Image (cartoon, rainbow, N blue to C red):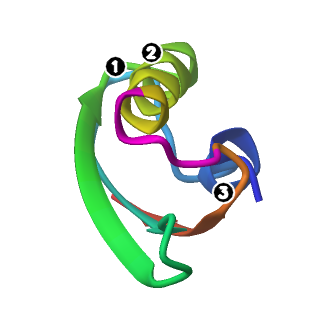
Amino acid sequence: MTIREAGKGIVTTVGGTYRIGFINMDGQEDETELDAYNMTELEELYRDFCKENGFRQNTVTYMER
């Protein structure tokens, strides 16, 4: 799923740290943490993270705050 789909009901507008599970290039489950103030910023950070590491953006498996 996408970061927006995974963050529905989790991402707030007051900011926070989000733990994001995703499938990496080796097909293994992986995890990262990003700090963001809202969904727009989180999407931008995750897009940049995926681009830098060669990951697909639609392989999110979960998100926790």
Q: Residues within 10 Å of mark 1 (few under 14, many from 20)?
A: some
Decide if residue 5 is on the left or right side of residue 19.
right
The residue identified by callout 2 is: 41
Which region shows up in magenta?
Answer: 52-56
Q: What's the CA distance linking mark 2 and mark 3?
A: 15 Å
1 falls in the magenta region: no
Foreground of the two, 13 or 4:
4
> Image height check: is 1 above or below 29?
above
**Looking at the rendering, in which quadrant would you find the C terminus?**
bottom left
The residue identified by callout 3 is: 6
**Looking at the rendering, in which quadrant would you find the N terminus?**
bottom right
The residue identified by callout 1 is: 37
Image coords of residue 51 (percent x, y): 47, 28
Foreground of the two, 14 or 2:
2
Q: Amino acid at mark 3?
A: Ala
Q: Nearer the viewer, mark 1 or mark 3?
A: 3
SS at mark 3 in the image: helix
> Which residue is at a point 36% across and 29% down the rendered structure image?
52
> Image height check: is 14 above or below 31?
above
SS at mark 2 in the image: helix
> Which residue is at a point 51% across and 64% down the rendered structure image?
25
> Which residue is at a point 48% across and 76% down the rendered structure image?
26
